[in-house]
Image (spheres, rainbow, N blue to C red):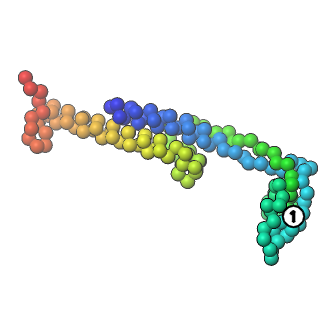
Amino acid sequence: AVLLAAGLGTYYDLTFKCQAATATSLGTAPLEGTGVWVNETEVYPPDGPDRSSEYANVFTPPFGSNRSGYVLVNYTAVDLGTRQPRPWSLSPLAYEGSPCWSEGSGAHFGQGILASMLMSAGAGLLTVSALTKVAQRTCGKCCCGQTLLDAP
């Protein structure tokens, strides 16, 4: 029972860590009115080496924008903040695709393994204990013929 309780406690703690991990960064964006728009081929020449390291920042606009073929260089970046964390849940599926899963950062992988091992060991031992108690009450013997009754 202690192993199962420790596993459940470890998992419960993990759910809060996974919820916090869903509050990921929204990234950065150029500050309006900063930087210089230059032809894309000046920064990424088709027949030469990449020159993006010569600039402080390089922003490529999304495909289909009115700045197609140009890049913004030496702009001031603005932090866009972080996403709101997902609602808390005991279900591991609530955090699917987040950094808590193995395809994310896997930062809490060890704690997840520990929780699963503690819960499985605790549940297994409780199952064996319950089956032994049922065998003791019904026939008084276990599978190998030994008596399970308490000695007088």
**Residue 59 screen position, x and y as percent:** 81, 57
In the image, residue 114 sits, relative to residue 50, either above or below, namely above
Q: Residue furthest bottom?
A: 47
**Residue 18 screen position, x and y as percent:** 56, 41
Quarter occupied by the C terminus: top left
Look at the numbered disc 1 and give the secondary structure of its residue.
strand
Residue that carries the numbered disc 1 in the rendered image: 70
Quarter occupied by the N terminus: top left
Residue at x 43% of width, y 40% of height: 115
Q: Amino acid at mark 1?
A: Tyr
Residue at x 82% of width, y 55% of height: 57
In the image, residue 95 sits, relative to residue 35, either above or below, namely above
Disc 1: CA contacts within 10 A as few (<14), some (14-19) or many (>=20):
some
In the foreground, 39 or 11:
39
- The answer to whether residue 32 is left or right of residue 147 is right
Q: Quadrant of residue 88?
A: top right
Residue at x 55% of width, y 45% of height: 107
In the foreground, 10 or 147:
10
Q: Is residue 69 visible?
A: no
